[in-house]
Image: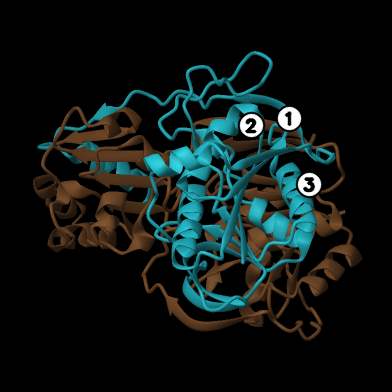
Chain colours: A brown, B cyan
Amino acid sequence: MSTLVFIEFNKNTISESSSQAATIANELQNEVYGLTSNDDESYISSLGSKGFDKIFIIDDFNNYSAIEELINNNGIKTILSPSSNTFKELSSKISTKLNFPIASNVLKIEKNGKISCSIFTGKAESHMINNNDSCIYLLNKNIVESQDFEKKADIIKVDSKVSENSSFEILEQKFIEEEISLNDADVVISAGRGLKGPENWQMIEDLAKKLNAATACSKPVSDAGWRPHHEHVGQTGLKISPKIYFAIGISGAIQHLAGVNSSKTIIVINNDPEAPFFKAADYGIVGDAFEVVPKIINSLG
Amino acid sequence: MKILVCVSCVPDTTSKVSFTEDNKFNKENIQFIIGPYEDYALARAVELKEKNSEIDISIINVGLSENDPLLRKGLAIGADRAYRINSEPIDSNFVAHNIASFINKNNFDLILMGKESIDYNSGLVHYLSGSILNIQTFNPVTYLDLENDKSVIIKRETDSGIEKIKAKLPLILGCQEPIAEWKIPNMRGIMNARSKELSVIEPIEVKASLKLDKYTLPPEKEEIKYIDKDNLELLIDELKLKNL
């Protein structure tokens, strides 16, 4: 039996989420396989260092029949995956066609089949028992630190059949051009209405740059058009779990917290000492963002 | 054209989550709502019907009779009929198989769901149903318009950006804002809803794949550490400790 990890890329390197998945796979089983649609073979072959023994290269994750064949032919019973939509869709197909149970928002996997998952957007956890010999785990981010391994990854190119006639046509594609993807960032600098207007975001971007962070915002800010919709984190926006989340001038409504409360460390800067966000924070600074943020930037040198 | 909107009935976003001793969600003093994403989906279906009265909208929920008032609310917002599959929504797999079985017996052109239900957050029911039925599924969809009675134009968020897509029906879409503005039922809608049909269907059996052991609440957060705004060193040290 072997474990398969779906590998996604962030720019030209394996995403942190996929590296973390490989680390967990190694804790569960010795033999760890990867599946990627990236064909940069020289880079892929270096991924033994992330814990892979074998990596399958496929032209497209939409090529379901080839992936099913690969799972069947290689005795794969466990699949670990980042929770991106591409992989959720693929995992759902595998789950229904091959009868693999599927667990979402996974926080912890134990060898005895015990699984813990985040529910109610982090307000509770469910603990499940898997009595089957197979399972697909869609992992939350940052549930482990990714580790380095001394493995050598063999590359296997998967022969893909021509994909079937598609029932849809992509008319237009817009790529979000951000330096650091919000999903994959270790540090996120987020700001809210307390910043008073879109013209005041420069210091947020400056701080983000200093900390190699992604920028985010609250719902009222994206609703007002101050920042693009894809930066909106919260109940109805993106849910993120970075290592450090800065909330600047965000009051901390429960709907906003739902999107960020699984962050490892939350730092809140707000001039209102009664702001509810302080109750969810690890560090709090009561003060004017326009005074505090430039000071932090300066201190970071 | 027949549209099906699948709705979850979930605790209001501000609810305090707790569980009973026999490992069930504690419903006491909890206000239930139609899930916010499904509320967007329903609102978009009603907007489409406002432009084309030949559209017929059904809503469906997997849940117990306590959800009927919310289904009535959906009818008041503008759905033509409601169905309830009479069971607790055990897990994504159970809900998807039951919805798929219903869709199999009643053809729909367009099936709208939310991006995810805000209680158990799996975000899988649309993909699982699509896979069971072999119907193309897109998620999350932020824009939807009918091109004609055979195809639609949608926008969906991908892992790297946004795609505008022309797609043939039938389709399953997981909806997200800003696909529509939420709708509040008006008096006329509420009156009309009383005479609309709400059918109860018995569930099909689905083998549970994972067994629930227990629910727990996450460990309490440690006390917040306040940092003086005129003495930020503690914060800077903390950041440096984390190699930033």
Query: Residue A12 got which mark?
Result: none
Decide which of A297, B192 is in the foreground and name it.
B192
Per the image, label 2 sits on a secondary structure element best described as strand
Q: Amino acid at mark 3?
A: Pro
Q: Which residue is mark 1?
A: B212
Question: Disc 1 on helix, strand or loop?
Answer: strand
Distance (Cα) linking label 2 and label 1 = 7 Å
For residue A76, which quarter of the picture?
Answer: bottom right
Which amino acid is tagged 1? Leu
Q: Answer with left or right where residue B33 lies relative to residue A179.
A: right
Q: Name the residue beneath numbered marker 2.
A: A126
Res A262 visible: no
The location of residue A235, given as percent across then percent down, is 42, 45
Of the numbered discs 3 and 2, the one sitting upstream in the chain is: 3
Residue B149, horizontal then vertical, whole percent? 60, 75
Q: On screen, A223 above or below A70?
A: above
Above or below residue A112? Residue A163 is below
The disc labelled 2 sits on which kind of residue? Ser
